[in-house]
Image: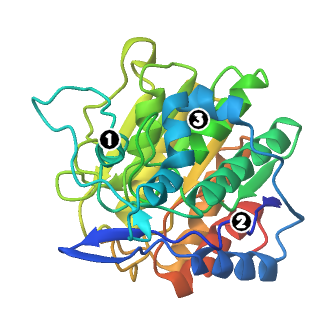
Amino acid sequence: MLIVRSDDDQDHHCLELDSAELILSWERPERSRFVDIATDAAGLGEVIPPLPFDRMLVETVHEPAYVEFVEHAFSRWKDEGHAASAAMGFGWPARRMRNVRPDSLKAQLGYYSFAADCSIAEHTWKAAMASAAAADTAAHHLAAGARSVFARCRPPGHHATSDQFGGYCYLNNAAIAAQRLRSTGMNRVGILDVDYHHGNGTQDIFYDRGDVAFCSIHADPMVEFPYFLGHADETGRDQGLGTNLNLPLPHGTGADTWFAALKSATDWLTGLAPDALVVSLGVDTFMDDPISQFRLVEEDFTEMGRRIARFDRPTLFVMEGGYATAQLGQNIAAVLTGFAGTS
């Protein structure tokens, strides 16, 4: 298994509003360090750096004005004299408000985001570029004949929509990888999101398209972030009708229920016959994750990898969530070794 990663995320920190307190985000630099240590120890395969950031590709997934905003938001924030170490929105265009892009930076921070759990700091853009480039590079290698590639992406991406950041995500790495695979001539790409939280951004990007099939197994959005997307009746629209599947599960879900949902997901994907599979690999389904409510254990992640391997498609894993930081590396490595058959 090829591993693509960069250290350009290590200076990226963000703040989030949690229970009426502004705290350092759960999405921290040490997450990637623990994953690197564990995947190196597992001996999964060669580690390579990403190719340069391909802005043109990214702007086929995200609106160009949004990409430009994320790139320059922090420098604008400092130029305006704000003392806070991160730029964050505090007003959003809610129901019965107009969908207009204001001139004010503070207003644009709300216009281009959907939650107060995600801020833009000095090194955010550098980290987001490296993360997107890792996913893109992994897709290049998969298209060139690799059976499996792991893009160790930080920050994660599956909550980023075509024009909004949130959920610790700025550029949608899984969507960028899928778009690259499509550009190489693949007729259809499947995306399987196994993160605890619904991949609302990925769904948003491909909801009208039939060439990328999206399936997500996640906590019920009636009680869990992102709340306003990820329900079972969301099945796609226009050309994408029938190529979106959500499998929401209740708090406390354990292995038996979760793996039954995985079988439903892979059976559904098999019927759509994708040429390759992108896995949004969040391991915040772990029983000790501090912000999640599922009950999987390390052995379940090994089995997850084995079952995804049975789908028998070229597979690209993109790292998403997982916030039990000390166990994150072992859980990611368990999925990858299970898939590779080295456990």
For the rendered model, the colour scheme is rainbow
How would you rate the neighbour count of disc 2 (Cα within 10 Å): few for under 14, some for 14-19, many for 20 or more?
A: some
Is residue 194 visible in the rendered image? The answer is: no
- The percent coordinates of residue 217 (x first, y second) are 40, 51
Mark 1 and mark 2 lie on one chain; the one further toward the N terminus is 2
Q: Are marks 2 and 3 in contact (CB under 8 Å)?
A: no
Mark 1: which amino acid? Answer: Ser
Mark 1 and mark 3 lie on one chain; the one further toward the N terminus is 1
Q: Which residue is mark 3?
A: 190
Query: In this rendering, which labeled residue sits more in front, label 1 or label 3?
Result: 1
Residue in the picture at 39% in, 18% down: 241
Where 193 falls versus 256 (above or below)? Answer: above
Residue in the picture at 51% in, 72% down: 13
Mark 3: which amino acid? Answer: Gly
Is residue 253 visible in the rendered image? The answer is: yes
Decide which of 174, 20 is in the foreground and name it: 20
- The percent coordinates of residue 212 (x first, y second) are 56, 27
Asked where in the image residue 179 lies, by quadrant, the reply is top right
Mark 2: which amino acid? Answer: Asp
Mark 2 and mark 3 lie on one chain; the one further toward the N terminus is 2
Q: Which residue is mark 1?
A: 104
Query: The residue tagged with tag 3: helix, strand or loop?
Result: strand
Residue in the picture at 48% in, 56% down: 79
Query: The residue tagged with tag 2: helix, strand or loop?
Result: loop
Asked where in the image residue 233 lies, by quadrant, the reply is top left
How would you rate the neighbour count of disc 1 (Cα within 10 Å): few for under 14, some for 14-19, many for 20 or more?
A: few
Tag shown at residue 8: 2
- Outermost residue on the top side: it is 238
In screen coordinates, is 322 left or right of 12? Answer: left
Query: The residue tagged with tag 1: helix, strand or loop?
Result: loop
- The percent coordinates of residue 192 (x first, y second) are 53, 45
